[in-house]
Image (spheres, grey):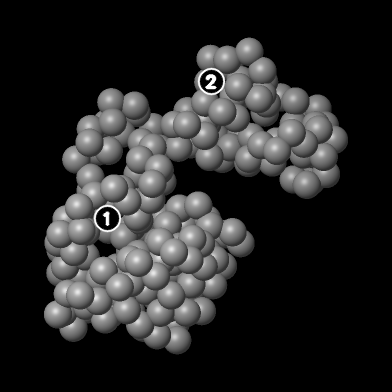
Amino acid sequence: MIRLLLADDQNLVRTALAALLELEDDFEVVAQVARGDEVVAAALAARPDVALLDIEMPGMDGLAAAAALSHELPSCRLLILTAFGRPGYLRRGMEAGASGFVVKDAPAEQLADAVRRIARGERVVDPALAAATLAGGPSPLTGRERDVLVAARDGATVADVAAKLFLSEGTVRNYLSAAIAKTGVRNRTEAVRVADERGWL
């Protein structure tokens, strides 16, 4: 029996996924959470074999939750399941310790097969996403440039970003300028959009 943890902030999606997976004779859903910051505690309590993590969740995104879970419960295999097939997400997901990456519109039998293969210790990656990732190359942003763009995502001012990240306003401007140059756009709003679309944030 393969024990599963599901993490998705959309209740309907999560419960439908649980019902679908439990139709398989060898699957048991042992935990469900709606927030990324609940993943580790739920996994430590339920001891799943495989955790299926959505990327977009409140509290902590699925990639950060994957990294935390990989550290706290290395025996649990991680499958990133998302509607966003962005190339940068695949690279970041694998760096966070994920064993697989499947887009949500994959057929049910493909998802079940991915879970079984990951439970056996294999890696599973959506082929189209793998090809796009190889074609796109790695993110050109440094960790700090990424942090600044994330902090500026909702229209925060330079002063707001500086206060949030404990940086000077001049340093924030320098990071924003570098990110704008690397994304090949005219301003930080466009830099955030491009970096987000490519899965770099």
Q: Is residue 178 visible?
A: no
Residue drawn at point x = 40 percent, y = 85 percent: 46
Q: Residue furthest bottom?
A: 45
Name the secondary structure under disc 2.
Answer: helix
Query: Is residue 174 found left or right of 146 in the rendered image?
Result: right
Residue drawn at point x = 31 percent, y = 60 percent: 79
Name the secondary structure under disc 1.
Answer: strand
Query: Is residue 146 found left or right of 77 in the rendered image?
Result: right
User: Where residue 134 sits in the image (x, y, percent)?
Assistant: 27, 31
Classify 47 as above or below 79: below
> In the rendered image, which quarter is residue 135 located in?
top left
Q: Quadrant of the N terminus?
A: bottom left
Mark 1 or 2, which is nearer the eye?
Answer: 1
Q: Which residue occupies the foreground of this view, 62 or 33?
A: 33
The residue that disc 2 covers is 182
Classify 31 as above or below 137: below
Q: Which mark, residue 100?
A: 1
Q: Amino acid at mark 2?
A: Lys
Q: Earlier in the sequence, mark 1 or mark 2?
A: 1
Q: Is residue 145 visible?
A: yes
Residue drawn at point x = 31 percent, y = 34 percent: 133
Classify 103 as above or below 31: above
